[in-house]
Image: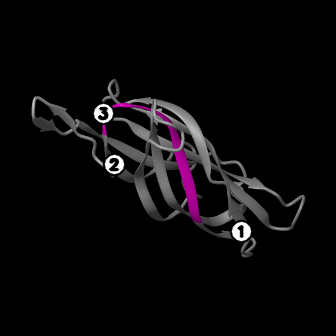
Amino acid sequence: MALMCVVTGGVVAEPELKPLELRITDHQAGIEEFKRLGVSLESVEIHRKGSPRKQGWTTLIGNVPCVDIVPLKNGLYTSISTAQIPVAQYDAIRVRFQHLDGVLHSGQNPDLTAESTTVLVPIDMLSLISPALVLDLYVESQTDHAPNKYVVKVKEIRVES
C-alpha cells in the first residue's frame, strides 16, 4: 500500500491510518445446492473519492486464501483481513476473484465461474469508528443453459460500523 505524505513547514507528516475489516458472507441464493463452495479472491481494492477512475486505487488485500462460503448464511460471516488505510473518503470497491472450487450435495463438481466487479460504495473513514466492509456473495444457477453451471457474484458491498 502506498503512503501519501503531507509536507508542512519542512516537516513530513504521515497520514492518520484507521483499520478497515474485510468480511465475506453469503446471500443464500443458490448455495443450498452445495456441500462446499470455496472462493479465493485475487484482490479487494478501494478507490479514493475525487481521484480519476483509473487511478486512486489502493489494494486492501491480495491473494485471499480459499474461504468456504456455504456455512456463511443467516448473518454469519468470516473476517478475511484488516487493512490500515488513510483516513479519507472513498467511493468504490473493486473485487477480483481468483479461484472457485465446489462440490454439490450430489457429489458432482460443478462448472463454476465468477464475475469480478466494481461497486460504488460511499465510505467516509473520517466518521466511522470501527468500520467493516462486508462482501455479500451469491451463487446464480445457470443450469437452464448448461448442467451444473453456476456463477458466483457480488450481491452487495456494505459498510458496517
Residue at the top extreme, as displayed: 127
Q: Is residue 58 visible in the rendered structure shown here?
A: yes
Pointers 2 and 3 in contact (CB under 8 A)? Answer: no
Q: Nearer the viewer, residue 15 or 11?
A: 11
* Residue behind mark 2: 83
- Give the colouring mode of the picture: one colour
Magenta stretch, main secondary structure, is: strand
| Amino acid type of the residue that numbered disc 2 sits on in the rendered structure | Ala
Residue plotted at (67% across, 54% down): 115
Residue 25, compared with residue 7, is above or below; it is: below
* Cα separation between marks 2 and 3: 12 Å
Query: 82 left or right of 39?
Result: left
Residue plotted at (75% across, 72% down): 106
Res 12 quadrant in image = top left
Element at badge 3? loop
Element at badge 2? strand
Residue 87 disc label:
3
Q: Nearer the viewer, residue 41 or 94?
A: 94
Looking at the figure, which quarter contains the C terminus?
Answer: top left
Res 10 quadrant in image = top left
Residue 124, compared with residue 1, is above or below; it is: above
